[in-house]
Amino acid sequence: MLTDRELVDRFVAGDQSAFTQLMQNHEDRIFGLCLRMLRDRTKALDATQEMFLTLYRKADKYHGKSAFSTWLYRVAVNTCYDQMRKEKRKKADALPAHLDPVDPHVTDEMRAVELRPDIEAALATLQPEFRSAVILVDMQGHSLEMAADMLEVPIGTVKSRVFRGRRILASNLGNLSNPSATPRDDRE
Amino acid sequence: MSDEENMNTDHPPFPDPDSPERIEMLFDLAAGVYDDATFERLTAGLTDSERHEIEEQRVVHTLLAEAPPIAMDDLERAALRDAIRSAGPGRGGLLGFRMPWGLAGMSNRIALGSAAASLLVVVVAGSFVMGGGLGGSDSADLTADAAASTTMQAPGAEESADADFFGSDENRLSAPETAAVESLQSIEEPADGSGVAAVEDVSVIRESDVEELLAETPSGPRPYNPDNLACRDELPSNDVTFGYLGQWRSNGDDQRNAVMFKIERGLDASVQVLDTADCSLLFELDK
């Protein structure tokens, strides 16, 4: 079985089937990341497509300095951030914020996400930086080193973001381990 | 036992509960990175609330780690594959492609953008002739600007093709096409009847206005797909979100044809202005 690096090399050399294989290797996890970041199936599909098209166009720019999957996820996270910014701009253009509140409840667009709806809703309350770190480390099982590479931040920052993200989740989910615990200030 | 009584001397008390050192230690304790002896030693000195936090971290981690993986359904997967297949070698398949999850009217936009760009080349070429080519007349500078304008507009044409490629970005799709059309109109209706004068209608990017572009919802010149602009390769990052093209006017009244890129990484944003002639950095601003 070919490694990602070998597949990229083959694709850059003109082998289209290598790209298909690359997609098969990563598309569901990229889609999962985007869906949990964006909380909307259509937007997640758009972001996934945009990410792979970026890969299609810029595969030759991958020079193997980091693991291919790290590079891929970095592009994916940035694509999701872009989507979120665009959404924010659209909302700013369309309606005053008070007329367009964030729906804290899981919608139909999240169908096929089997995680507990309350956890998904709590996840949506996290700032994008915390959310991406929690998804990559806790939900997708990437190492801290890889997540740091993907997010282009130091490992300590990843730890901090995951820690704070979990803390907010615990608070929003009702103090899972000790109902009497004192809520904390979660500013970074 | 109170929190104060719980303290030991293995690590100093953390005055700030959000200090990086405290968070890192609690994170590592929750992650189980220490051997038993070290874990015992470190946890012996923890406060009750710190122990609670470690437990809380573990519970949330377990909940999240147990989440089943997400997968696309068959239709979604097929649509994604089709989209990539349509991108095919040489990108020739892009123009007719439409995202299955809804981007009505895109083909019309593409046709409009392409037509505008094609006409623009013709008009500018005409203006080039009317201006006397590269001869040493007074119009030479304007002619050079006209040539630059051709370069400026060509990305708009390519953008219209890329528009379908990057089907999800409606903001980015519409803006360059509109910009291309507006530039075309301005060149078709020059103020003095010479085809060259309208070149002065290209966007003006003022140093004093750059800060505005760092805002979440920037106003000012219309953005282009940055990947299609000159000097883009000078910025290897994938975080370039907007590109602008026009005449740069510094606070010192220096005037150059320039490209301007907005770079967004996380919540940070910066703007770089590059000279189109040699891609040298003219100006940079970080937020």
Image (cartoon, grey):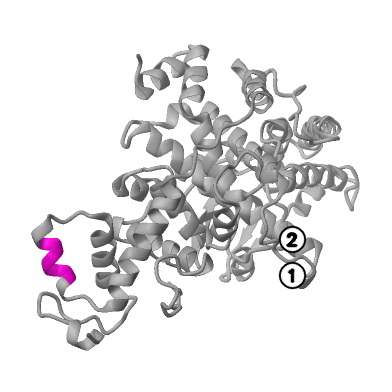
How crowded is the residue under tag 1: few (<14 C-alpha within 10 Å), some, or many (20+)?
A: few
Horizontally, residue A24 falls left or right of residue B175, namely left
Looking at the rendered structure, the kind of residue marked 2 is: Lys
Q: Circle 2 is placed at which residue position?
A: A91
Q: Position of residue B284 (x, y in %)?
A: 49, 61
Horizontally, residue B258 falls left or right of residue A72, namely right
Q: Position of residue A179 (x, y in %)?
A: 45, 73
User: Callout 1: residue from which chain?
Assistant: A
Q: Residue A97, which numbered label? A: 1
Q: Position of residue B267 (x, y in %)?
A: 51, 62
Q: Main secondary structure of the magenta part?
A: helix
Examine the image and state in which quarter residue B159 appears: top right
Q: B254 above or below B137?
A: below
User: What stretch of residues is rendered in magenta?
Assistant: B38-43
In front: A122, or A23? Answer: A122
Looking at the rendered structure, the kind of residue marked 1 is: Ala
In front: A49, or B215? Answer: A49
- Do the dots labelled 1 and 2 sit on one chain? yes
State the CA–CA distance, disc 1 to disc 2.
Answer: 7 Å
What residue sits 41% from the left and 77% below the top? A181
What residue sits 27% from the left and 66% below the top? B26
